[in-house]
Image: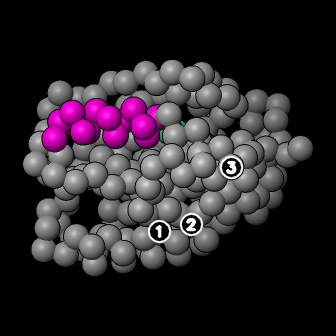
Amino acid sequence: MKDVSLKGKVFEPFLSSADLQLRISELADYMNEDYAGREVILLGVMDGALLFLADLMRKLSCSFHVHTVKLKSYEGQHSTGTVQKQIDSSVKVTGKHVIVVEDIVDTGLTMGFLREWLKGQEAASVQVASLLVKEDVFQNKFEIKYKGFSIPNRFVVGYGMDYDGYGRGLGGVYVLKH
Ligand code: IMP
Ligand code: MG
């Protein structure tokens, strides 16, 4: 893996495509065991979770349906402190087992917001799968049952995650160089 430049900023390799796929297979194995014989709804948080969701789906053997919600809290490299929501009104989760699929949990604002919404919808159960977690910022505000990697508080791109819309298609994860 080589450094990549996006909008004049340089990012260095952090997690390879192979690292990601191996870990996603492990997470899928846990889910296959936990949800065997039950039907689950994967609720992907767009746009960042696109690639994680797609790869996870291909590794799941339990029965599932997929829905997406569009949430946005970041501008550039920073959280705006508010969450913009667009939830498709056809998403019905009442009485269903839900796994929220997220690219990265940073402050936990986005996921906290979605968890409250799901509570209001009376889902049968709600668990969170996040590929990455910035532990120092998140500080375990709620349980993340399926966690890919704990990472330091640095800005990352790739594998669905973007810097102002750029870098989402990279197969691995890259971190902004100091
Ligand atoms: P939170 O609401 O602060 O937990 O931020 C979560 C959302 O912000 C994620 O779903 C991402 O879309 C975005 N985000 C947080 N950290 C990063 C990062 O390092 N790179 C790209 N996007 C990020
Ligand atoms: Mg996201």
Residue holding disc 1 = 24
Q: Position of residue 7 (x, y in %)?
A: 76, 30
Real-space Cα distance between discs 2 and 3? 21 Å
Give yes or no for contact between labels 1 and 2 (Cβ–Cβ under 8 Å).
Answer: yes
Q: Residue at x 21, y 33 (%)?
A: 120
Q: Residues within 10 Å of mark 3 (few under 14, many from 20)?
A: few
In the image: residue 31, left or right of residue 164: left
Real-space Cα distance between discs 1 and 2? 6 Å
Q: Position of residue 45 (x, y in %)?
A: 39, 41
Name the quadrant containing residue 84: top left
Residue holding disc 2 = 20
What's under tag 3, amino acid-wise? Answer: Asp
Q: Position of residue 24 (x, y in %)?
A: 47, 68
In front here: 78 or 157?
78
In the image: residue 55, left or right of residue 154: left
Query: Is 129 located above or below residue 61 in the figure?
Result: above
Real-space Cα distance between discs 1 and 3? 23 Å
Q: Which residues are magenta?
A: 110-122
Q: Residues within 10 Å of mark 2 (few under 14, many from 20)?
A: many
Residue holding disc 3 = 136
Q: Residue at x 14, y 32 (%)?
A: 90
Q: Position of residue 28 (x, y in %)?
A: 37, 71
Query: Is 9 located above or below residue 104 in the figure?
Result: above
Res. 149 mark: none
